[in-house]
């Protein structure tokens, strides 16, 4: 798949526009992931990321090609407010994991993350031809769970008492959405602009192998119907490494804040 499809020029909604991250966005990442309120919702570890951890994560997983990561901008002002991504894209099985963080706290609860997630799902099931998108979220992050439900994610199960936060243990909730579910929901709403052109009326993309990302430096400890023939599938993209002993855990710091 060409990189121009893999990384669209822009995904445009009513409230937000998603586009590739630029190197200068690092300053925003340092502020977001250094904020205890954001860290509470996005990290397994207690406390914010260190500046050097943020820099390594940004280089390897945000502007690199190990995952499909897009910046979330307000459509009216172009203000950068967050980041969203797919990781572990599996061309053989048509699956991927979703992550989102709205780093600007004054933008929480205004529907920006919900629309960004909707745009990413349109890209995943349309242009990328995925069959399933999954995610995990901490049970106390009720705002994020409501947002995910709103766009069609369903709860699959709970990892019981998997996270210690606020003086007690909490479950980690696993959610997913399938392509037929997305298609049924999408039929009830308008088109989304992808690469500057409306996506309305596009049939399901044929299953295809997800392109092999170019290698980047690893982050040291830190976040059916019969398918048509497809190109040779690449190896799975490893989950983004996490700060402080996250490499062994295989978990990612990008969740909806």
Image (cartoon, rainbow, N blue to C red):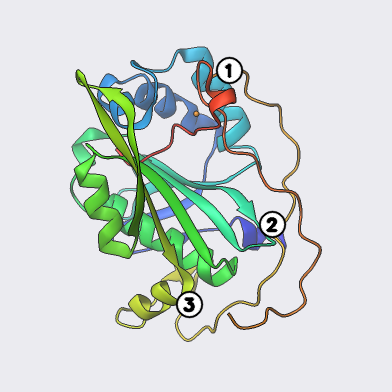
Q: Is residue 110 left or right of residue 25?
A: left
Tell me the quarter of the picture where residue 32 sits.
top left
Residue at 64 percent of width and 37 percent of height? 64
The image position of residue 133, as x and y in percent, is 48, 58
- Disc on res. 253: none
Q: Position of residue 54 (x, y in %)?
A: 49, 21
Residue that mark 3 sits on: 199
Residue assigned mark 2? 3
Residue at disc 1, secondary structure: loop
Q: CA distance from mark 1 to mark 3?
A: 40 Å
In the rendered image, the vertical position of residue 145 relative to residue 57, given as above or below: below
Picture layout, residue 125 above or below residue 107 = below
Numbered disc 3: secondary structure: loop
Q: In front: 154, or 125?
A: 154
At which x and y percent is residue 228? 72, 80
Mark 1 vs 3, N-terminal side: 3
- Helix or strand or loop: what does disc 2 sit on? helix
Q: Which residue is mark 1?
A: 221
- The local crowd at label 3, few if under 14, some if 14 to 19, many if 20 or more residues have their Cα within 10 Å, is some
Which residue shows up at 51% across the image and 50% down it? Answer: 97
Q: Determine whether, in the image, residue 205 is placed left or right of residue 30.
A: right
Question: Can residue 76 be seen at all in this image of the molecule?
Answer: no
Mark before the other along the chain sequence, 2 or 1? 2
Q: Is residue 221 above or below residue 74?
A: above
Question: Alpha-carbon distance for marks 2 and 1?
Answer: 29 Å
Mark 3 / mark 2, whichever is N-terminal? 2
């Amino acid at each position: 798949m060409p990189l121009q499809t893999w990384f669209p020029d822009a995904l445009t909604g009513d409230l937000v526009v998603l586009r590739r991250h630029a190197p200068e966005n690092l300053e925003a990442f340092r502020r977001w992931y250094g904020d205890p309120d954001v860290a509470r919702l996005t990290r397994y570890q207690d406390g914010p990321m260190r500046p050097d951890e943020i820099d390594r994560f940004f280089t390897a997983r945000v502007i690199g090609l190990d995952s499909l990561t897009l910046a979330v901008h307000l459509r009216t002002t172009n203000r950068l407010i967050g980041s969203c991504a797919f990781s572990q894209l599996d061309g053989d099985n048509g699956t991927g994991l979703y992550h989102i963080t709205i780093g600007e706290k004054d933008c929480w609860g205004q529907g920006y993350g919900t629309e960004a997630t909707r745009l990413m799902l349109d890209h995943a099931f349309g242009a990328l031809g995925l069959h399933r998108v999954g995610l995990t979220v901490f049970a106390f992050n009720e705002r994020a769970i409501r947002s995910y439900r709103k766009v069609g994610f369903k709860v699959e199960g709970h990892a019981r008492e998997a996270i210690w936060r606020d003086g007690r243990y909490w479950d980690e909730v696993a959610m997913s959405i399938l392509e037929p579910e997305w298609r049924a929901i999408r039929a009830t709403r308008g088109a989304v602009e992808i690469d500057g052109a409306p996506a309305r009326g596009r049939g399901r993309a044929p299953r295809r192998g997800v392109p092999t990302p170019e290698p980047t430096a690893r982050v040291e400890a830190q976040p059916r119907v019969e398918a048509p023939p497809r190109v040779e599938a690449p190896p799975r993209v490893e989950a983004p490494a996490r700060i402080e002993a996250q490499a062994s855990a295989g978990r990612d710091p990008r969740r909806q804040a």
